[in-house]
Image: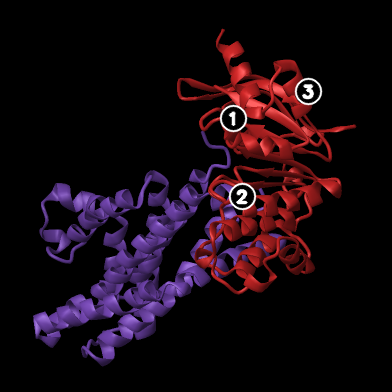
Amino acid sequence: MKSLKRTFAIAHRVLLTIRGDKRTVGLMFVVPSLLVGLFSWMFNNAAVFDKVGGRLVGLFPFVVMFLAASITTLKERRSGTLERFLTTPMRRGEFIGGYALAFTAMALVQTGITLGFAIYVCGFSTQDSVWLLYAAAVVNALCGMSLGLLASAFAQTEFQVIQFMPAFIFPQIILGGLFVPLDQMPDALHTVSDWLPLTHSLRALVNITDGLPLADVMHEVLIVAAVCAGCLLLGSLTLRKRTA
Amino acid sequence: MSDVASFTGVSVRRGKATVLSEVNLTLPAGQIIGLLGPSGAGKSTIMRALVGVQSKVSGTVSVLGLPAGSASLATRVAYSTQASSVFDDLNVRQNLEFARTMIGAPAERVDAVLGEVGLTEYANQKVENLSGGQRNRVSLAIAMLGSPELLILDEPTVGLDPVLRAEIWAIFRQLANTGKTLLVSSHVMDEAERCDRLIFVRDGRVIANDTLANILLTTNSTSAENAFLALARKQVA
């Protein structure tokens, strides 16, 4: 009970922090939609856009969440607040749980706006349920968030976190099947691609927009959920109370 | 008089360097204990060992009769890190409400500590818009929330003008008068005369642990600064 109360208090505090930074809120909520719009305009072809639109709706929140989560947690590790509150009854699982809750709330709003924009402004249409697509896109954003939480453990500065973008996120985007379909890649790259979380979260979205059976969608979603859970667990292990 | 904490043969290594070597200390209850020494002397390491966030500690650190860092000490000992560790992007009340939930302190403590540190009228101000002294008082207020028996405050007055420093020391004195023990670090020697007891630290060693009067007497000095110099020379020799 107390543990739950602390977890919610941490989530509340993270949301207050984000809300206080109006410019970040604007960027988080508006930029993914604008990028989706840019793609739609560039393709200028409803059939092509319907093919990639689902993945785009998941991709941009993935990237934005990765950055937002990694930088906010890094800030907390560096500012002394984490060290201070680890000496209170707060447990690191509660800390990670609170962050995950707060960013889930952000992901729900952000993905909702992006998907709404794709459908109502860009004329995107999907073979399967929009709600299923929404859920899969949120999972995509959560995947970015949990990778970000984990990444913050391996960075000392904000600059380093930004460098994780080209180092860990770009390869996943390049090999994620957005540019070249997986079955047309060289075997070695196809194998690598199969091990990247983004590949599976994007495939879940494609399976929905292509109208594949629910089992195919859930298979991918479960893989991504397992990666999220693993990253959050590893992330909480990196929050050491005792440091040098 | 009982002791709230003790160090027995405590050493701390960071990589290959020894940052604390063979420290033996006791902290008597109900006093303001000044932990003085230059930057890098090991003041923060002593404090971090006390709250159990320092790794690679050998020897025994006990606090209120328990090993340092024990779960049941979490509400009996409060710690404020050097960076004053508050959330800049929240207002004063939000900081305190959050800390209150983490510590499990009663709701009325928020207004009580706000009054005690003189921040009642700033409750709705964002911390980043406050002055350095007010910011330090927010950090102090968080430490006071849970009515802890021992407050460990790392450089709580750093960078403050003398008037603000005097204000913060007045709060420390009030806390000590109600039986709390405070361990306060500083690299400013003139804060020594405000403490009941002093611990001088240099190069990871404790070079003095006594009242200011006794330290001045044994070193035949007239100021804390000169006493420190005399002791440091003796250490080198």
What separation in Å lies between label 2 and label 3 (alpha carbons)? 26 Å
Residue B162 is tagged as: 2
Residue in the picture at 57% in, 36% down = B187
Mark 2 closeness class: few <14, some 14–19, many ≥20 residues within 10 Å: few
Q: SS for tag 2?
A: helix
Q: Which residue is mark 1?
A: B37
Sequence-first disc among 3 and 1: 1
Q: Which residue is mark 3?
A: B214
* Image vertical order of residue A242 relative to residue A63, above or below: above
Is the N terminus of chain B in the top left, top right, bottom left or bottom right quadrant?
Answer: top right
x and y percent of residue A103 in the render?
46, 68
Residue B96, compared with residue B124, is above or below; it is above
Q: Earlier in the sequence, mark 2 or mark 1?
A: 1
Query: Relative to A241, is B5 on the left or the right?
Result: right
Q: Residues within 10 Å of mark 3 (few under 14, many from 20)?
A: few
Say which chain is purple.
A
In the figure, residue A46 lies in which quadrant? Answer: bottom left
Mark closest to the chain's N terminus, 2 or 3: 2
Instruction: Provide the chain ID for the residue under circle 2.
Output: B
Which subunit holds the residue at mark 3?
B
